[in-house]
Image (cartoon, rainbow, N blue to C red):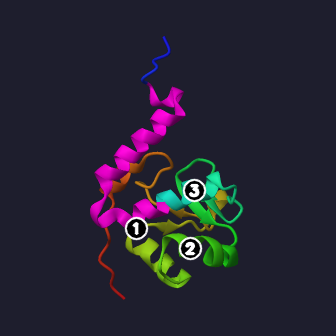
C-alpha cells in the first residue's frame, strides 16, 4: 500500500516537486521564494542556531542577529536588516509578541515545505 509516487516516501521526488512549485510561484514573489530557500539551505548547512523555521514550520525566527546580518543575509538579500524587516512587514509577515513563538515572523501562506502557498502572498500597501 506504499505508493512509490508519494513524494513523502522519496526525498528526491519531494525536492523535485518543491522545485516545480518554485517555478510556478516566481514573478513578484521572488523575494519570498528567496526567504524559503535561505531557510532550507541554512538548515542543510546546520546553521539553524542563526535563523530557522520554528519547529511547527509556520514561522521563522532570527536567533543571532549579528551572524544573520554578516553571514546569511548577504548571500540572499542586498539589504540591511532594517530594510529586510520592513520588507517582511510589507509582505504581510507579523512578528509574534507572546508565547513560545515570541520574536518569530509568521505569515499564513509561508509554510515550510509548501512553496506553492507563496503565490497567495502579495505586497501590502504601506502607509506611514
Q: Quadrant of residue 118?
A: bottom left
**Earlier sequence position, callout 2 versus callout 3:** 3
Percent coordinates x, y for residue 7 in the rendering: 46, 30
Percent coordinates x, y for residue 100 in the rendering: 67, 57
Percent coordinates x, y for residue 39 in the rendering: 56, 58
Q: Which residue is mark 2?
A: 73
Q: Quadrant of residue 3?
A: top left
The magenta region covers 6-35
Residue 69 included in the magenta stretch of the image:
no
Q: Which residue is mark 1?
A: 31
Q: Residues within 10 Å of mark 2 (few under 14, many from 20)?
A: some
Looking at the image, residue 75 lies above or below residue 116 = below
Task: Name the residue nearer the viewer: 116 or 76.
Answer: 76
Looking at the image, residue 117 lies above or below residue 33 = above
**Earlier sequence position, callout 3 versus callout 1:** 1
Give the Cα separation between the discs numbered 2 and 3. 12 Å
Amino acid at each position: 500500500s506504499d505508493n512509490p509516487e508519494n513524494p513523502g516516501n522519496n526525498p528526491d521526488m519531494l525536492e523535485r516537486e518543491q522545485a516545480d512549485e518554485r517555478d510556478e510561484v516566481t514573478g513578484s514573489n521572488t523575494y519570498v521564494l528567496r526567504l524559503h530557500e535561505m531557510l532550507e539551505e541554512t538548515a542543510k548547512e546546520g546553521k539553524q542556531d542563526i535563523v530557522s523555521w520554528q519547529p511547527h514550520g509556520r514561522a521563522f525566527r532570527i536567533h543571532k542577529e549579528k551572524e544573520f546580518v554578516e553571514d546569511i543575509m548577504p548571500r540572499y538579500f542586498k539589504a540591511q536588516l532594517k530594510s529586510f524587516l520592513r520588507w517582511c512587514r510589507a509582505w504581510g509577515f507579523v512578528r509574534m509578541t507572546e508565547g513560545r513563538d515570541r520574536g518569530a515572523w509568521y505569515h499564513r501562506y509561508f509554510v515550510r515545505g509548501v512553496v506553492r502557498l507563496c503565490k497567495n502572498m502579495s505586497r501590502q500597501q504601506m502607509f506611514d
